[in-house]
Image: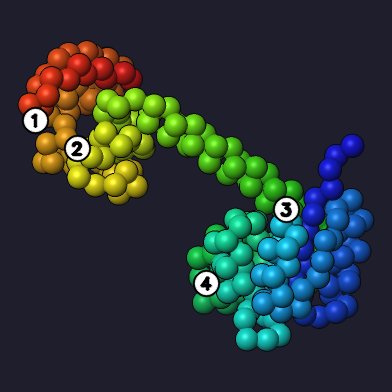
Amino acid sequence: MTEKVRILVVEDEALVAEDLKEMLRGFGNEVCDIADTGEKAIALAGKHQPDIILMDINLAGAMDGITAGGEIRSRWGIPIIYVTAFATQAIIDRAKKTVPSGYILKPFNERQIQTAIEIALYNSTLAKQLKEHDATISTLINATSSPFILIDRQGLIRAVNEAVAKMAGKPPEQLIGSPFMDLLPTGCITTRLAEAVQQAESGRGSRFEEENKGTLYDYSVIP
């Protein structure tokens, strides 16, 4: 049997909350709880760790749904779908900063809710797989004490190990996303190595020895 999707409903209008609850149950999902304020939403999200949250934006109390959604995303990474009657550009801009998994305008229908949930869960699964993939790459490249750099076709650094970071004098997270040629002035890479990396864009690998900062390196450039 397919495991039920556990959903937290955040809605301060009791009738709307009950309608959503019955609708979600009709899809075969489990509504683990209902919150009517942003503060309760955060507390219940931490307690239940739901698979997804349907979050109204305009809530009773001092905290609105966007503030609560941002806090929940930063703490637990739970997918958030905003359900609201408001769609001003200012609200949308605020909502985007919390990286929501969907945005549904009231009045909504069953198909809109069901589709939004399916897409949000699918994207959440992909995000988890990518995170695991990145963790695997990080583990592999740090398994060696030799400098290791992973570069994409645009010449941007996708991953480095601690050995490279130490040579560059920066933490790994500051190097990721930057052009590999930025390592040239730091002395972390040599002109010959930079040229070999550029040649690799055409599919040609190379291997050579070269001295850098008093150490002899056996370089391998693999497309």
Q: Which residue is mark 1?
A: 213
Looking at the rendered image, the disc whose residue lies closer to the viewer, 3 or 4, is 3
Q: CA distance from mark 2 to mark 1?
A: 10 Å
Q: Which residue is mark 4?
A: 94
Whether the residues at callouts 2 and 1 have beta carbons within 8 Å, the answer is yes
Q: Quadrant of the N terminus?
A: top right
From what the image shows, is residue 207 above or below residue 198? above
Mark toward the start of the polypeptide (3 vs 1): 3
Q: Secondary structure at mark 4?
A: helix
Label disc, if present, on residue 167 of the rendered structure: 2
From what the image shows, is residue 35 above or below residue 177? below
Q: Who is closer to the viewer here, 150 or 104? A: 150
Give the amino acid type for the residue marked by disc 1 in the picture.
Lys
From what the image shows, is residue 78 above or below residue 41? above
Give the amino acid type for the residue marked by disc 4 in the picture.
Arg
Q: CA distance from mark 3 to mark 1?
A: 51 Å
Q: Position of residue 43 (x, y in %)?
A: 69, 70
Q: Which residue is mark 3?
A: 51
Whether the residues at callouts 3 and 4 have beta carbons within 8 Å, the answer is no
Q: Who is closer to the viewer here, 75 or 83? A: 75
Quarter of image, res 3? top right
